[in-house]
Amino acid sequence: GWLDLYVANWACVPKCGRAYEGDKDRLYHNNGDGTFSDATNLLPGGKTRGAGFVASFVDYDNDGDPDIYLVNDEFVNPVGNALWRNDGPGCDGWCFTEVSEEANAATKVMGMGLATADYDRDGDLDFFFSNAGPMTLLQNQGDGTFSDVAEASGVQFPQGVGWGSVFFDYDNDGWLDLYLALLQGGSGGRPPNPLFRNNGDGTFTNLASDSGAGNIGRSIGVAYADYDRDGWLDLVVGNYDEGYHLYRNTLGDISNNNWLTLKLVGAGPVNRDAVGARVWLTDSYGRTQLQEVKNGSSLGSGNTLALHFGLGRAKASLVEIRWPDGTIQRIENVPVNREHEIVYGRDLTFKQAIPPTTAAWVLATVIGLALAAVWFIKRRSRWAIWQIALLALLTAC
């Protein structure tokens, strides 16, 4: 229940350039008493001196424990990115195996920002990371391997120097979109930061300046949150030597798409912010989305810890939570277009709402019965019960 810490330590003092080992990254084990112990020796492969820019705890293989993906800067030390698979207890305390080569995830780029999410809704987490040059989108194949689909997906952006990046559903259509912070263009120009809209077919469309958030400054960091609590995710972008820009999402003024925000709260054996919890949401159309609670995202940034799901025109049929201790919680018929706080160990139930069409029929039938009864009483009719029922039905129609 105690959160551990990975520190990516990019450094090239007193010099920079290939091949030079940066200062060593650190994996710190939380001792549970306010102190940490250095556990870097648990990470094999020699890639903790590769000039790490950003790392993420992420369960890429769906086995219930957090693995580690590290993005290294090959300009300082071209050892490639690292993927440590979490293999559980043993190995002088805990077992990690470096599997980046066999997983096709040992990409060698001037890596910087990292975003992890299930952008293609196939039930596993994918990796996007930026570069001084073509960006990389590693699509999880579900068999322990990845495939770079950045070019085919339309997010490669080959002529740019990218930094922070985030997956988020800006239009609440149920598909995660992608925002990239650009320091500059490939030729030194200042193209607008791209907002890639997820088309739902494995491809993205760059909205560029049309998004309203196409900052043309020297952007470094980006993070998302619903700061005004209107159900539409907003962005904050940090620019080099300039400051920050806050972009309010105004799509809620013209769109009727539904949404649902879940704030998970830990207790007992689960950390306070429920970091590491995994949530599956199945909507009324039978589609399932997957998200994980994580802190430390993008590059030098942190997104909201609340999980935000866009739903399009659908409702939320089932929410299934796997808490960090393995406990499974299922919640049905969660009301949409609002935020719900879910506390570990507390039951949360909702009554199933009557569909509008059903409610209309019920109301019409009641009115029809009432009118039929009035008609029957006034005329002292001797009609049979089935005749009265038929009259009520016709009245309802």
Image (spheres, grey):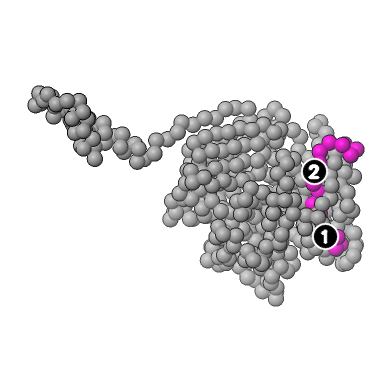
Q: What residue type is labelled 2?
A: Asn
Locate residue 388: give its quadrant. top left
x, y percentage for residue 377? Answer: 13, 24
Looking at the rendered structure, the secondary structure element under dot 2 is: strand
x, y percentage for residue 20? Answer: 90, 62
Locate residue 307: give its quadrant. top right
Badge 2: how crowded within 10 Å, few (<14), some, or many (20+)? many
Q: Name the mark nearer the viewer: 2 or 1.
A: 2
Q: Is residue 91 left or right of residue 367?
A: right
Magenta-drawn stretch contains 86: yes
Q: What stretch is highlighted in magenta?
A: 76-93
Give 212 or 275, whichever is nearer the viewer. Answer: 275
Q: Say above or below: 203 vs 84.
A: below
Q: Can you name the residue that lies furthest to the bottom here?
A: 187
Residue beneath the point at 82% across and 52% down: 99
Q: Is residue 363 left or right of residue 18?
A: left
Q: Which amino acid does label 1 sit on?
A: Gly
Reading the image, the residue beneath label 1 is: 80
Q: How far apart are marks 2 and 1 (CA)?
A: 19 Å
Which quadrant is home to the C terminus?
Answer: top left
Is residue 245 visible in the rendered image? The answer is no
